[in-house]
Amino acid sequence: MGNIPHSTATKSDPVLAFEFDNAFLRELPGDPEVGPWVRQVEGAAWSRVAPTPVAAPRLLAHSAEMARVLGIGEADIRSPAFAEVFGGNALLAGMDPFAANYGGHQFGHWAGQLGDGRAITLGETINAAGQRWELQLKGAGLTPYSRTADGRAVLRSSIREFLCSEAMHHLGVPTTRALSLVGTGEAVVRDMFYDGHPKPEPGAIVCRVAPSFLRFGNFELPYSRGDLLLLRQLVEFCIRRDYPDLASEGSMDERVHARWFGEICERTAVMIAHWMRVGFVHGVMNTDNMSILGLTIDYGPYGWIDNYDPDWTPNTTDRHGRRYRFGWQPKIAYWNLMRLGQALSPLFEDVQLLNDGLQRYADVYTREDRNNIARKLGLRECRDEDVERVQELHQLLADAEVDMTLFFRGLADVDVDAPVLQPFAHAFYDDEKRTAAEPVFDAWLSGYAARVKEDASDPGERRLRMNAANPKYVLRNYLAQQVIDRAEQGDPSGIEELLEVMRRPYDEQPGRDDFARKRPDWARERAGCSMLSCSS
């Protein structure tokens, strides 16, 4: 395990109270080689590799909620031992670090072996409630899958991942979580936009947490190599560990495999519908970034829709093709599920079972989308005409350059007896466009008000229902960038301040209106606010 020592904290320290059950290592074949040298790993699901120690680990932020789930006390979070462990300098008893082996389709093309190039799992812990949580350090150093990279992560990208993991959880979006953000005391050289201008930046490590970090790509890689034994082992392991209700049905036959694939399709549909509801754009929906549990995973060049634009993507790598644009996310998820289905096809005699799973995705997404329309508009049900109503609204928002979050939040306060556009003036990015579009918006609002009256919901209940679906606070890129700017100057306190706001995204928070404003003009073209790369 290299030169990583075990922690010397006392046995009474709750940090050492983890119960580890490293099933992934125990039940699946591993790489016979140990260490971070780059290689093609055949016939194995993982490679043992230790985190590379850092110069001066320092806790910059943590999620109090995730710490409580894991049974970690606040005093232990603040102890030097915590930063040592979650900065990659020490291991607790029972930790057995590894990097996972997987492949993936990137921007629509098969990329071969990819794997955890800068993520190292410390182990799988079982908490007091019997829940399994995999603890993974992102930015912890070289692995066999690092290719030409250094296995590290910069502070800006780590802040973004830490904040977004928790912000998405509080929005009610299925997601991986974040326990901690540790500064390394070391510089990492990055060329942010791959334009020949690398520079040193502060380094950091995020501890990511999820019941499982298995991805579509874990199954694609053995399929691509014709390794059907490993493929079957992975499928049956995933069902036993991550879908135990299906495993309890008996033998792992084609019927169980089909139900499992259908569950993945359904969970993916629910996740994507949530993304579209809150205006989240993942930015890099490669199959290696798609969770087998339907969780949002790998927060890189993500962003939130400011002015509504279905063609917007925050990823500069995708700026020409816009494959991963906001409006295409439901379609791309389906395409990715097709690739997963293809990888699983050798296990099926009846491929119609896989097609049934894909149809389940389409059906569930349609159901969830209609449910979101009803909630966002404050209606008891979504009719076909309401789908058309929202499509018309989306076109109006795009044409007039209107902030999606602000407009939908404001919709709950429309006077249905006198609906006018004036209360939405703060949501427009261009006054001339607002003036020109006012007649058509007034017409839309009049039709909406009539529909609300017909629905006959209690006004108070309608407002509560809408405000529970339309967040007031989202992690806009410019808000994250302001926190990053402060942290890079030595003041990480803004991370916790912003996280505190994002803990209650649907609530009115007096005194915090500055966090609920539209994107300022200075952020329209600024790096980190509108333009991000895969290293962001």
Image (cartoon, rainbow, N blue to C red):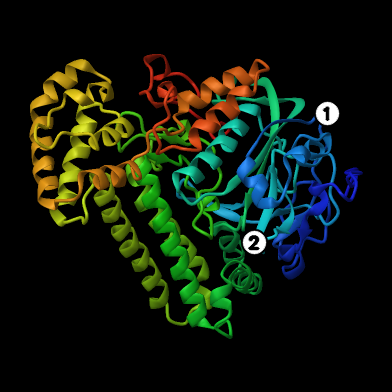
Between the residue at mark 1 and the residue at mark 2, the CA separation in whole angstroms equals 33 Å
Q: Nearer the viewer, residue 356 or 518?
A: 518
**Residue 313 on image: x %, y %:** 40, 35
Residue labelled with disc 2? 131
Circle 1 Cα neighbour tier, 10 Å, few/some/many (<14 / 14–19 / ≥20): few
Q: Amino acid at mark 1?
A: Ala
Can you say whether 274 is above or below 24 in the image? above
Nearer the camera: disc 1 or disc 2: 2
**Which residue lies under the disc numbered 1?**
55
The answer to whether 299 appears left or right of 447 in the picture is right
Relative to 22, 347 lies left or right: left
Q: Where, quadrant-wise, is the C terminus in this rendering?
A: top right
Q: Tell me which corner region of the image, top left, top right, bottom left or bottom right, holds residue 43.
A: bottom right
In contact (CB < 8 Å): disc 1 and disc 2: no
Which quadrant of the view contains residue 84?
A: top right
The amino acid on which the numbered mark 2 sits, given as a three-letter code, is Gln
Q: Position of residue 255 (x, y in %)?
A: 48, 82
Q: Is residue 293 left or right of residue 16?
A: left
